[in-house]
Amino acid sequence: MNELWTQHGKVRAREADGVLEVVVDGLTTQAKYYKPLIYEFFRKAWRGSRPSWGDFSVEIGMEYVGEPPWLDLDNLAKALLDAIKGYAFHDDAQVARLLVERRPGERERITILVRKLS
């Protein structure tokens, strides 16, 4: 994936080889914080592909430094899926495969990978 990033504030995204990659810098324990942040990015800055129908695979990774934050991954997934709905796909019912994981990383961030399933 060497496509150029589109950035707006703490959110950046790129598309390549049928994969939409969205990265949010920083972490908070409030899952509801992410929905307006990502929604604003797509509304103001994103000029990539439009949503499509069909089944999708979504991988969400929460990277942290030090102690893992107290954040329910199911709440995080719901907020992020709501935020990208209408941009990556029409409805989150189209998500046929969902992986959400918390892992140590070099910096605190959220990564979302969206792939259309064949």
Image (cartoon, rainbow, N blue to C red):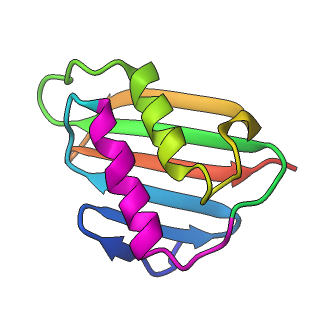
Identified at 80% across, 43% down, the residue is 55
* Residue 101 in which image quadrant: top left
Name, please, the residue furthest toward the right: 118
Principal secondary structure, stretch drawn in magenta: helix
Identified at 34% across, 73% down, the residue is 7
Quarter of the N terminus within the rendering = bottom right
Q: Position of residue 50 (x, y in %)?
A: 68, 69
In this figure, what is the number of numbered marks? 0
Q: Position of residue 117 (x, y in %)?
A: 81, 47
Identified at 20% across, 48% down, the residue is 26
* Residue 58 in which image quadrant: top right
Identified at 13% across, 23% down, the residue is 67
Name, please, the residue furthest toward the left: 66
Looking at the image, residue 16 lies above or below residue 108: below
Q: Position of residue 92 (x, y in %)?
A: 66, 38
Horizontal arrangement in the rendering, residue 89 relative to residue 117 (left or right): left
46 vs 18, nearest the viewer: 46
Horizontal arrangement in the rendering, residue 59 relative to residue 9 (left or right): right
Assess whether residue 49 is covered by the magenta stretch. Answer: yes
Assess whether residue 99 is covered by the magenta stretch. Answer: no
Magenta region, residue range: 31-50
Q: Position of residue 59 (x, y in %)?
A: 55, 40
* Residue 68 in which image quadrant: top left
